[in-house]
Image: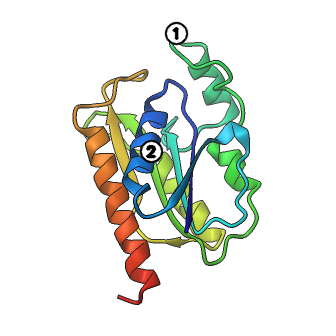
Amino acid sequence: MKALIVYESMFGNTEKVARAVADGLGDAFDVVLADVSEGPSLSDVDVLVAGAPTHAFGMSRPGTRADAARQSGARPGAAGVGLREYLDDAPMLPGIAGAAFDTKIDKPFLPGSAARRAHRRMHRLGCRMLLPPESFRVSGTTGPLAAGELDRARRWAGTLASAVLSERHGV
């Protein structure tokens, strides 16, 4: 089975989480890890995992990416296409298992989530969303990730792998 992890990352934190998710899925699936700017193909995908940073209470937009790109530490080309546009251009995905995650600043009661928006969009495209959206915390706008978040991302991916395999085997 093939799992595609597509991510958007401005400062590298979401990419680190995506890599940890890939590690957590690697024993159960043939994993393809791709930056959203690469426009990875959705053909022959059994599991789609989408990750993005939370910007302005949801998925980034061209303006929020441009603002973030002006900050020091932003990755070159990070202001290009984002997860929002990738999912807007995606074909219907009936039968594909899905999950979504985001990174967001570690502040109590901070509203909004890119993962919740991506989760809803993927569901509308026909994905079977097997886990609720998940947020991984960063200590500030540019990071770093909060302590323990990469281990938590690997465990979350293991839970996703178990859900996909249980569903596949009718358990």
In this orientation, which residue lies closer to the viewer: 132 or 64? 132
Residue appearing at x 71%, y 39% in the figure: 38
Residue 164 in picture, x, y percent from top left? 43, 73
Per the image, label 1 sits on a secondary structure element best described as loop
**Is residue 73 toward the left or the right of residue 150 in the image?**
right
Residue appearing at x 52%, y 35% in the figure: 55
Residue 98 in picture, x, y percent from top left? 52, 65
Location of mark 1 (residue): 72
Residue 99 in picture, x, y percent from top left? 48, 61
Per the image, label 2 sits on a secondary structure element best described as strand
Going by the numbered disc 1, the residue's amino acid type is Ser
In this orientation, which residue lies closer to the viewer: 11 or 121? 11
Residue appearing at x 39%, y 66% in the figure: 161
Cα separation between marks 2 and 1: 21 Å
Determine which of the numbered discs, if any, sits on residue 102 in the image: 2
Nearest to N terminus: mark 2 or mark 1: 1
